[in-house]
Amino acid sequence: MALADIKKKIETEARQEAGKLLQRAREEADAILAEADLQAEKMRQSYERRLQEEEPEVLRRRRIVADMDVQRLELGARREVIGKTFETALGALRALPAEKYEAFVTALLENAMITKSEEVLVGRKEKVVTAAWLEKFNKAHDASLTLSSEKLDGSGGFVLSQGRVDVNCTFDMLVHSLTEDLEADVVERLFSS
């Protein structure tokens, strides 16, 4: 055997061995790819199954959140209507005709007096409760109330002051204090169908 024949034989055997190695590598790569495809399909099926299982719960939660949002908006609208209702009541008190206003303030003052010698604070725009009116009230009720030179920011009603004790009978305070007591009744009247 000549050197050329030996060389040719070695090359042929090397090519055959390389072909076998290459074939084994391709088979292993195909097996790995097939396994990866199988794993990917299992994952896809798992995610689809989870989606089908969880979708109703996700939708239920979204409905709950949407319902809560609607309730929050509805509550805000109701609160606004209730607030406007009480604001309208306050406006009606302030707009009472002079004779009804005077009668209302007289009744308030009769019920609010404790010592009959308190100081009476009124709003800057007060037109009924004046020094002359208070003088008539004092005579009729055997009282010695005095009109304060200090004026209130609000309009309507008064504050009786005796030392460190104040009795707030301003319309703002009256409506505010009644708001809590009457709110349930107002809600029922406004929103019951």
Image (spheres, helix red, strand yellow):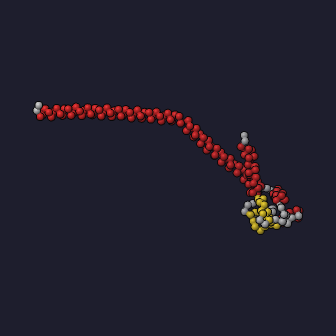
Q: Residue at x 31, y 32 (%)?
A: 27
Q: Is 54 placed above or below 141 here?
A: above
The picture places residue 2, in percent across and down from the top left corner, at 10, 32
Snapshot quadrant of residue 15:
top left
Q: Say left or right for 56 vs 120.
A: left
The answer to which of 9 and 92 lies nearer the viewer is 9
Which quarter of the figure is the C terminus placed in? top right
The picture places residue 115, in percent across and down from the top left corner, at 84, 63
Snapshot quadrant of residue 190:
top right
Q: Residue furthest front?
A: 1
The picture places residue 104, in percent across and down from the top left corner, at 82, 56
Q: Residue at x 18, y 34 (%)?
A: 11
The answer to which of 69 and 48 lies nearer the viewer is 48
Q: Is 91 placed above or below 51 here?
A: below
Q: Residue furthest left?
A: 2
**Whether residue 61 can be seen here:** yes
Q: Residue at x 44, y 35 (%)?
A: 43
**Whether residue 131 can be seen here:** no
How many numbered discs sit on the rendered protein? 0
Q: Is 145 placed above or below 20 here?
A: below
Which quarter of the figure is the N terminus placed in? top left
The picture places residue 108, in percent across and down from the top left corner, at 82, 58
Snapshot quadrant of residue 44:
top left
Q: Is 118 placed above or below 76 here?
A: below
The answer to which of 110 and 42 lies nearer the viewer is 42
Q: Residue at x 81, y 63 (%)?
A: 129
